[in-house]
Structures are given as structure tokens and as C-alpha cells.
Image (tube, helix red, strand yellow):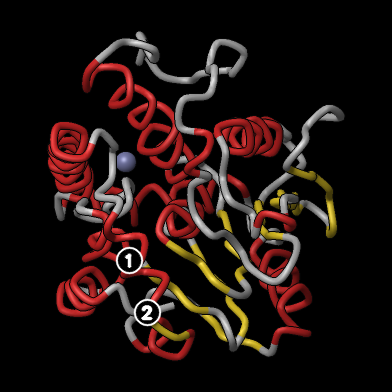
């Protein structure tokens, strides 16, 4: 815990743990190390008998700008992996698909199933892979200026890797987000059920901790069973199958882009996204 570089961990209220993304100078862009450290921090909170609710917050102006694209070929040998994925350095589609299956979809699904309530506390921009840290949480509280976008269709892929868009935004808004790359506002997110509460920026921390402390007064087993029951309902609606199906298509896209552009993304889309930002 003490040698984490991009994540902080504290206990800001009784029976509440808080994990904070601490890479504000990069708008909390996620390199592999940060994702791995977030996972380790969730494990610390999950295994602490005295923790009943876990908050995921972020330093700086923006919750997360997505994946750190400069880190995609990073050495993974020192990272603590949690799944059965392997051959991360293999050629072709094999290695990179394994990286994303482990670090993106695998970690997100693991966090989604932690048997304790989790709350994302969100300010500023959440872009593409940034949503990967918000949507697996049980509850979302955001500040009034927060925005949510997944503009990566411009890069020739279907969306970020944790493809639960229709469950989060409803099918129509999910399609609009993907087709246009438009950032939806906090109020739109509230209206469509993507977030639970919108508060002024200065009240974000206190509102989050108030909700967490309120939840943490309930018995752990009751909370875990309630969470599992709702998650089971999402599973009955096919969420995991849909997620895996979209992940397969996502890697068709990465492979297509590699063949056509020698890059996992269509590089022409970078300008499109920048021009519209
Ligand atoms: Zn990808």
C-alpha cells in the first residue's frame, strides 16, 4: 500500500474506505500500473472486516481522461494479475487481447462483483476508459460540471472495453453517445439513471461520504445480498454475455486497425475528437 504511485487509500469515515486516483497531472489517465494499484486497493478494502462501503474518488479537475495510450506496450511482468490470462507479449491479436481481457474487462468485472457497496465520486471529465472506473461501481455521485463521453468510435472501435453502455444510459442515449462522441452532462446522466445524485463541486466529497456512512450503518451481509441480487438481475438481462460479445467485436476492430493502419486505433480519429472537444 505504501509504495503505490498513482493511488491513495484512506478511511475517511467509520466503516468507509476511500480509494483516490492520484495522477491529477495526467488527468488521471490510466496506465497499467494505476489499474493494478486500484485493484490492489479494492482488495485491501474488501478484505477489511471493518469496511462496509468503498468510495472511488479522484484528485484534480477531472475524474479520468481514459487509458494512457503511451503505456499500451508496457512490461506487465511485475504486475499482480488476477485472472487466467497469459502470453501478454504474444504477437498478433493474442497478446493485446489478453492484456485488455486481464486489465480492462477482467478487473472491471471483478470490482463490479466485490460483495460490498461501492460509490464513484466524480468530477470533471470522464472520457472513454474513464467510464471503466465509474460504471462498475454500484452508485455514482457527480458534481454539476461533470461530463461523460466515449468518443472512440472516431478511432475505429465500438466503444471502450467495459461495454455496458445500454445498461448505463439506455439503448438510445448509448447509441447517441457512441455515434456522435458527444459528452453528456451530469443532468442528462441523472435523467437517464447513469448517476444517483448531482451536487455542487464543493459538496462532492461531503455528499459522497454522507451516502457512504449512511450505507455503512447497515449489516454487511444484508448489503452484500442486496448487491448480489441486483447484479443477478443484470446478469439475467444478459449483461455479462453482452459485455463479452462487445469485447470480441472490440478486438475485431483493434485487429482491423492493425492491418490497415499498423495501430490498434484509426489515427485519423484523433483529429476528429480534438476538433470536437
Ligand atoms: Zn481496446
Q: How many marks?
A: 2
Q: Which residue, given by chain and number where applicable, does mark 2 sit on?
A: 276
The quadrant in which the C terminus is found is bottom left
Residue at image point 71% right, 49% down: 19
Q: Which residue, given by chain and number where applicable, does mark 1 sit on?
A: 151
Q: How busy is the neighbourhood of tag 1: few (under 14 within 10 Å), some, or many (20 plus)?
A: many
Residue at image point 75% right, 50% down: 22
Q: Is residue 5 left or right of residue 95?
A: right
Q: Is residue 11 left or right of residue 80?
A: right
Q: Is residue 108 left or right of residue 235?
A: right
> Residue 96: x, y in percent?
32, 25
Q: Is there CB contact under 8 Å for labels 2 and 1? A: yes
For mark 2, give the secondary structure: helix
For mark 1, give the secondary structure: helix
Quadrant of the rendered structure where residue 167 is? bottom left
> Residue 47: x, y in percent?
67, 30
The quadrant in which the N terminus is found is top right
Residue 191 or 71: which is nearer the viewer? 71
> Residue 180: x, y in percent?
23, 77
Q: Quadrant of ligand 1?
A: top left
Q: Is residue 220 left or right of residue 258?
A: right
Mark 1 vs ligand 1: CB below 8 Å: no
Residue at image point 36% right, 66% down: 271
Residue at image point 27% right, 57% down: 268
Q: Is residue 11 above or below residue 190?
A: above
Amino acid at each position: 500500500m505504501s509504495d503505490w504511485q498513482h493511488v491513495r487509500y484512506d478511511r475517511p469515515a467509520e466503516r468507509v474506505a476511500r480509494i483516490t486516483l492520484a495522477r491529477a497531472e495526467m488527468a488521471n489517465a490510466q496506465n497499467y500500473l494505476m489499474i493494478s494499484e486500484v485493484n490492489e486497493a479494492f482488495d485491501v478494502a474488501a478484505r477489511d472486516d471493518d469496511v462496509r462501503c468503498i468510495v472511488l474518488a479522484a484528485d484534480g479537475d477531472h475524474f479520468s481522461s481514459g487509458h494512457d495510450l503511451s503505456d499500451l506496450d508496457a512490461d506487465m511482468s511485475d504486475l499482480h494479475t488476477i485472472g487466467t490470462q497469459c502470453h501478454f507479449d504474444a504477437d498478433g491479436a493474442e497478446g493485446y487481447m489478453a492484456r485488455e481481457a486481464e486489465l480492462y474487462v477482467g478487473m472491471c468485472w471483478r470490482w463490479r462483483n466485490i460483495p460490498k457497496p461501492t460509490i464513484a465520486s466524480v468530477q470533471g471529465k470522464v472520457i472513454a476508459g474513464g467510464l471503466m472506473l465509474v460504471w462498475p461501481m454500484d452508485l455514482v455521485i457527480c458534481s454539476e460540471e461533470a461530463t461523460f463521453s466515449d468518443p472512440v468510435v472516431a478511432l475505429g472501435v465500438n466503444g471502450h472495453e467495459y461495454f455496458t453502455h445500454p445498461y448505463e444510459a439506455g439503448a438510445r442515449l448509448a447509441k447517441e453517445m457512441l455515434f456522435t462522441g458527444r459528452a453528456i452532462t451530469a443532468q442528462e446522466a441523472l435523467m437517464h439513471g447513469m448517476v444517483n445524485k448531482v451536487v455542487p463541486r464543493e459538496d462532492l466529497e461531503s455528499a459522497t461520504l454522507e451516502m457512504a456512512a449512511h450505507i455503512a450503518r447497515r449489516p454487511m451481509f444484508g448489503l452484500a445480498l442486496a448487491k448480489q441480487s441486483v447484479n443477478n438481475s443484470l446478469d439475467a438481462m444478459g449483461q455479462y454475455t453482452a459485455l463479452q460479445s462487445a469485447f470480441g467485436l472490440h478486438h475485431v476492430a483493434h485487429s482491423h486497425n492493425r492491418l490497415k493502419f499498423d495501430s490498434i486505433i484509426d489515427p485519423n480519429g484523433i483529429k476528429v475528437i480534438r476538433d470536437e472537444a
